[in-house]
Image: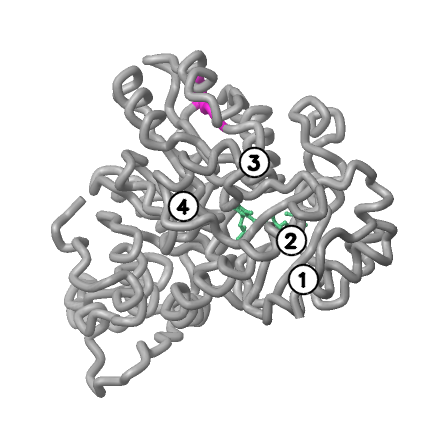
Amino acid sequence: MGDTNARKYHLATELVYIDSEAVKDNYNAASVPIYQTATFKQQNADGSGGEYDYSRSGNPTRTAVESHIAKIMRAERAFVVSTGMTALDVILRLVKTGQEIIAGDDLYGGTNRLLTYVSQYSGVKVHNVDTTEVARVEERLDPVKTRLVLLESPTNPLIKIADIRTIADRVHKVCPSALVVVDNTMMSPYLQNTLEYGADIEYHSGTKYLSGHHDLMAGVIGCRAAQVAEQIYFVINASGSGLGPFDSWLLLRGVKTLGIRMEKQQSNAILVADFLEAQGLKVHYPGLKSNAQYELHRSLSSGPGAVLSFETGDVALSERIVEGARLWGISVSFGCVNSLISMPCKMSHASIPVEVRKQRRLPEDLIRLCVGIEHPDDLIGDLANALGKAGVELKGELRK
Ligand SMILES: Cc1ncc(COP(=O)(O)O)c(C=O)c1O
Ligand SMILES: N[C@@H](CCSC[C@H](N)C(=O)O)C(=O)O
């Protein structure tokens, strides 16, 4: 990691402070301009004399958000692409036929879908293991074949934690040419910096916390080493997966408020998790002291985030709860200022075949909550109302 990425200020300050060197604007515009252009004029007949030539290869608005996010992620270099899935797709281009991937067994449904596709059509073997146990990852390491170890931590939707530090250390010792890749979407770079724990690549769905308002799709890839970054840039330029100027601008605007959004969403989520646990429900959230991974997660992050899930023991009951909520929108995705409720097995993870969901013990009745910035009393009140209407007997007194 270059010294250029060392933090000068507190993270909350770094988020809003855009380095004026990032974009050389003739008019000192206070907001980074949107360079809505496909091509750039050159000075010489050999095509030289311009910093940019074509927006697939590079665009000043995209450069501004990339250098800003690299600083936040403590990455040597960061890239922004069209979606979170594109970020993974770009990374997967570094894996060749005959090589192997070790990935979690609790993963976002779309990630599972892409990995399944790759394993079926590219001659790349994918081992899905429980990444909460370092030994399960170690068992699958092959010094020659392992190319990627892909961790989601926390996982979507069971919010399970991987010991990223220990896994990265073991992988690098046993497989010097393997890359440790972490999908850090659930935490955002505000709460967890995995490149500091030895991850080679950290990626995000920028559609979530980084943008924060569900008004754009984006993906982010941060690299720890320049050589890996070169390979990633090659794929992005060659395949044309870079983020467009307007979405780059929206993403940059969103990142500035990441800190205050995350603080509020997280403090709301802690209250919501406490409320649900007090109802006797099985709650998955590393912010609860009862969670077996509470200490591990604290050692890796500065907070538990704002996504949690819980089980009711009955699919029909879960459906009634979800449909009974008013403030909580029934929707996929998370990381937005609005609170959302969903049933992963029927929505975000429906693409995982039911027999695979069973085998991986993904509960069909699971409800996932993505907590927003509303007043916590309203959120808990609405949830209590939905639970009560669905037939759950409420315990304890609701805060006024
Ligand atoms: C953990 C995680 N990673 C990646 C993605 C993919 O992101 P996108 O929807 O921006 O392609 C999602 C959700 O879509 C996700 O939940
Ligand atoms: N129909 C979509 C579902 C997207 S789910 C988005 C998000 N990652 C979540 O976990 O809610 C698809 O098939 O990809």
Give the mark toward the camera: 3 or 1.
1
- Left or right, 335 with reference to 351: left
**Pointer 4 residue:** 203
CA distance separating discs 4 and 1: 32 Å
Which badge, 3 or 2, comes first in the chain's sequence? 3
Disc 2 vs disc 4: which is toward the camera? Answer: 2
Q: Which residue is mark 3?
A: 107
Q: Marks 1 and 2, how far apart in space?
A: 7 Å
Where does the image place residue 205, in percent across and percent down from the top left? 48, 52
Q: Residue at x 83, y 56 (%)?
A: 388
Part of the protein shown in magenta: 97-103
- Location of the N terminus by quadrant is top left
In the structure shown, which secondary structural element does the residue marked by tag 4 occupy? strand
Give the spatial CA distance, label 2 vs label 4.
32 Å
- Type of residue at label 1? Ile
Mark 4 and ligand 1: say if the CB distance to the nearest ligand atom is below 8 Å: yes
Is residue 310 visible in the rendered image? The answer is yes
Q: Specify whether residue 101 is painted magenta.
A: yes
Q: Say if mark 2 contacts mark 4, CB within 8 Å.
A: no
Residue tagged 2: 275
Give the residue drawn at x 48%, y 52%.
305
- Is ligand 1 within 8 Å of the beta carbon of the residue shown at mark 3? yes
